[in-house]
Amino acid sequence: MVIVVLTALAFDFTNGFHDTANAMATSIATKALSPKAAVTLCAVLNLVGAFLSVEVALTVTTAVIRIQNPDGSLRPELLADGGFNILLILLAGLAGAIIWNILTWLWGLPSSSSHALFGGLVGATIAGLGFDQVKWLGEGAHLDGVIGKVVLPALASPFIALVVSAIGTKLVFWVTREVATRYRETGFRWGQIGTASLMSLSHGTNDAQKTMGMVTLALLACGEWTDLHSIPLWVKVACALAIAAGTYIGGWRIIRTMGHGLVSVSSPQGMVAEASSAAVILTSSQLGFALSTTHVATGSILGTGIGIGAKVRWEVAVRMVVAWLTTLPLAGLVGAALYGIGRLIGGPPGAAAVFLVMAAAAGYMYWHSRKDKISHENVADIDWDDDEDDEPWPVAAAAGPDDDLAEDEAALVAVGALGRDPREAD
Amino acid sequence: MEQLLAALDASWRVLLVGTLLGAGLPVLFSLGVKSVAWGVGGEAEQHLRGVVPKPHLAGRLLAYLIFTLVVLIVLAGIGFIAAHGLGWTISFDAAGLKFSHK
């Protein structure tokens, strides 16, 4: 129980640092904000956002798995063993999501934290309850299930964002064509700060909620909490703090990829990217077609490049898309494997084992990352092209959507080599 | 199949509203930047050597107006997020804004 809560908070933390880039990458890249100021602003707004969302997020799992009734309560037949199986599924799902989040961070790839969470849960559910307990497809025209809530939005979001921001960029540059470049840059930096703040706030309201829902679900499973219409205050505070802390630490690797890797953004482009991301995300969540912040932000940044015909590093974009496609199945695989381990050992020691495996994996990847540290000190200064010139990127992106773990390990090695390039360039 | 159609249906709506707000707001902002440049004159505008553009008061006033509008729209956006988080839904229809509590 305590382990599940800790793991959920750890997931919230990785969610925070994974997604700082979505809101702040372009502001940092154009130096509208210093890296430290950007993450501080983003963290504060995430904290505020998390508290703003009092909407009960208990039904977080219902989109993809069948362990809850429509009103959010857990299905009674699953609670027969004191809720231990449910707890183990939640734990393995969260741990799988965390491992995938840290792995993609190590590669500097933005991938959707909610997809990782859904993937982990789906995997753990298949392992624990069987294939048919996963809700694959929604019924009728109501978007639901793995296909309706995860796959289709993921396919649509980058394109929508791309079109919006391409149109925006084209118009903005046309309007300001007679304004001196330097003056234009300064002016748009203010706009960037505003739109980036909007993104951070909406991220806090959306994503912190998911963890709050998971923690409360765990409390429900073991009977520590019975109210289906509210969330314990300490859960709210803990989740808000975890996501803000994660944001403040800053996923500098991902920020670098988003800010420099795809398109070298100028501040008008940055502002358009943030504005179109915020608009698309807010509109979509209002329409019940929730799109992943990560996918939208990436699409927007690509769009700003296309809008003015700037150089887009498509090889980076392709690698990201591969990461998106593999997020769900691979986080699922990790979730399932962890569930297996927990089940094999059984009881509280099993849960402890899952936690230890996750901690060990996280620790190893963190240690690995120290070899080529990217921090707030160098994030805005490393020129992406420096390390690209003499050493073309390894084509890790060749792996398809249905690649198995062995291929993925090969990709890890290949992309790991890429991660070391900046240091060599120094 | 129905799921696919539902997703397509949602997509074009998001695209439409997203374009209006997501591209519209920066364009409005850029009009502000453009008028402030016109208002300030001098080195803010691209100009030929020796022909320094004159400052225009109207440009600055127009810029302030536009920036105020942008700030208001952004504040409305924040209000929207906050209202949504507090369990309100806001929908647009012919009569204008409609607030309803869940």
Image (tube, helix red, strand yellow):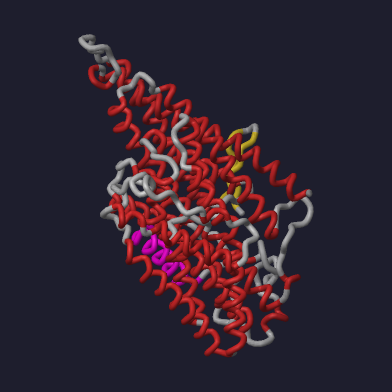
The residue positioned farthest toward the top in the image shown: B51
- Can you tell which quarter of the image residue A44 is in? bottom left
Q: Which percent across, then down, holds residue A255?
A: 39, 52
Give the image location of residue B16, x and y in percent: 61, 34
Closer to the camera in the image, A383 or B59: A383
**Residue name at image x 40 percent, y 29 percent:** B29
Please identify the residue farthest to the front as the structure is shown: A390
Q: Nearer the viewer, residue A39 or A100?
A: A100
Question: Vertically, is A262 above or below A404?
Answer: above
Residue A47 position within the rendered picture, expressed as x and y whole percent measured from the top left: 40, 59
- Main SS, magenta region, reads helix
Q: Which residues are magenta?
A: A232-252
Q: Position of residue A2 (x, y in %)?
A: 48, 82
Give the residue drawn at x 51%, y 47%.
A317
Tell whether A127 sits left or right of A35.
right
Q: Residue B10, relative to residue A142: is it above or below?
A: above
